[in-house]
Amino acid sequence: YELLKHAEATLGSGNLRQAVMLPEGEDLNEWIAVNTVDFFNQINMLYGTITEFCTEASCPVMSAGPRYEYHWADGTNIKKPIKCSAPKYIDYLMTWVQDQLDDETLFPSKIGVPFPKNFMSVAKTILKRLFRVYAHIYHQHFDSVMQLQEEAHLNTSFKHFIFFVQEFNLIDRRELAPLQELIEKLGSKDR
Ligand SMILES: [Zn+2]
């Protein structure tokens, strides 16, 4: 498992466990909103560095290794899941996330405007879907990431992401299965 060896080599220790905790006096929704936006931007940038390698030909289906395949549905515009290439799926996914982040009723930009009651469930769906982009990059494009010497960057970003979702229990364990081994490795280093 090449990527685990690499993860181990490039992940600094740092105190990420502490960094993801809710700062004193901070509103939980606000904290989750800020971090969700940050992860979206990080993933956008990371995927941006390998888009030329993620094509209709290289990735005709959205997968995370041989055992996991994803079909796109957003629940509103596309209700029946459609099987599509990874670049198309990720385009749908990132556009959908951007739309949620831009929705003032979900992510109010003005201070003092309350978050909606369903905020946490929307945030969970966003993070669950963003995870799939990491999973696709790790499983299908880690060689390109290494060629670009972006692996430390990817690992740090993913570790931060995982520690964050673990801290607040934001993604179901079964959704994390495609990268379970890597996740266990990341966790064990800081405990
Ligand atoms: Zn791909």
Image (cartoon, rainbow, N blue to C red):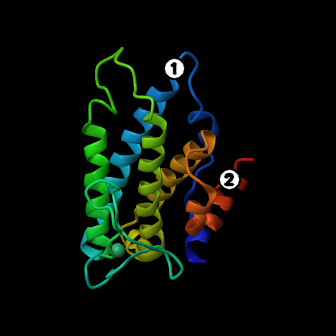
Numbered label attached to residue 187:
2
Decide: is 90 above or below 66.
above
Q: Amino acid at mark 1?
A: Glu
Viewer-nearest residue: 46 or 117: 117
Viewer-nearest residue: 156 or 123: 123
Relative horizontal placement of residue 60, taking residue 127 as reference (left or right)? left
Q: Secondary structure at mark 1?
A: loop
The residue that appears at 57% across and 76% down in the rendered structure is: 2
Q: Secondary structure at mark 2?
A: helix
**Distance from the alpha carbon under mark 1 to that under mark 2:** 25 Å
Q: Quadrant of residue 167?
A: top right
Mark 1 crowdedness (10 Å alpha carbons): few <14, some 14-19, many ≥20 = few
Total marks placed: 2
Viewer-nearest residue: 128 or 153: 128
> Can see residue 16?
yes
Numbered label attached to residue 26:
1
Q: Amino acid at mark 2?
A: Gly
